[in-house]
Image (cartoon, grey):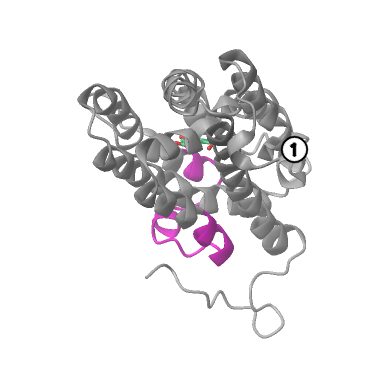
Amino acid sequence: MNADTIAALSRPEFEQALRAKGQFYHIHHPYHKAMYSGQCTPEQIRGWVANRYYYQIQIPQKDAAIMANCPDPSVRRLWLQRILDHDGHDGDAGGIEAWLNLAEAVGLTREEVIDERHVLPGVRFAVDAYRNFARQASWQEAACSSLTELFAPEIHQSRLASWPQHYPWIDPAGYGYFRKRLSEARRDVEHGLTITLDFFVTGAQQNRALEILQFKLDILWSMLDALTMAYLHQTPPFHTVTDQAVWHRGL
Ligand SMILES: O=C(O)c1cc(C(=O)O)c2c(n1)C(=O)C(=O)c1cc(C(=O)O)[nH]c1-2
């Protein structure tokens, strides 16, 4: 069947199809499964936290790109909250600061996280692909790419439910980020979902939305593949040549 002749799904059917993409969420990645079943070493937890920092700092730039491409003040007014959530405002130090608290709670120094020395090239390329997509795509397509957040509260909850018992060496003061995201992700996704359901209405458009969501799922999965090579198999980039972290730290 030609892409133009694909029958459109009803609004509830389309929402269901988007939600069904949860089967490919990174909660099912072996690295995540190892984390919440208590099988990770401190080094593997630290590697994940230090690398995920790069995602955390790129998210507000991604959201700023969406706002820059969006001519509608009513959308920008709501979208702005995402940037405030991560960068902080008034009495709230913000998500990036909360992530640094998590980093310290797992035994990393702020310095080694902020200078990005642990960020693997594969993680950097995956995260950059997300931010760059938001710069180049329409704001509606970029909003759609944030819909993995449909599945995020469950993953934050799974960490809160399992990490304290499996990893007593982690300072519980570090768990604030996961708690904070439970409500923020639910609110974000309501807005992102409304934009997506309103904008992608023909069968071909809906297929494109599902492909965009798959692109984002691929990004999250690829980040963990890179971490697996480095921290599970002990085969970081260039390991056949050197045991030094010679990869670049961002240009
Ligand atoms: O820990 C996670 O597994 C996870 C996943 C995702 C996601 O699904 O994209 C986000 C977050 N956390 C998160 O903390 C966050 O702030 C966030 C923003 C976005 C986005 O696409 O705009 N995703 C996510």
Say whether residue 123 is magenta: yes
Q: Is 134 placed above or below 231 here?
A: above
Position of the N terminus, as image quadrant, is top right
| Residue type pointed to by label 1 | His
The percent position of residue 243, horizontal first and vertical second, equals 64, 78
* Relative horizontal placement of residue 157, taking residue 100 as reference (left or right): right
Could you say which is closer to the camera, residue 227 or residue 133?
A: 133
Position of the C terminus, as image quadrant, is bottom left
The residue at 23%/28% (across/down) is 72
Could you say which is closer to the camera, residue 140 or residue 124?
A: 140
* Relative horizontal placement of residue 112, taking residue 45 as reference (left or right): left
Q: Can the viewer see residue 98 in this picture?
A: no
The residue at 31%/45% (across/down) is 65
Give the residues drawn in magenta, as a range: 102-126
Could you say which is closer to the camera, residue 222 or residue 204?
A: 204
The percent position of residue 103, horizontal first and vertical second, equals 49, 45
Say whether residue 207 is magenta: no
Residue at the disc numbered 1: 28
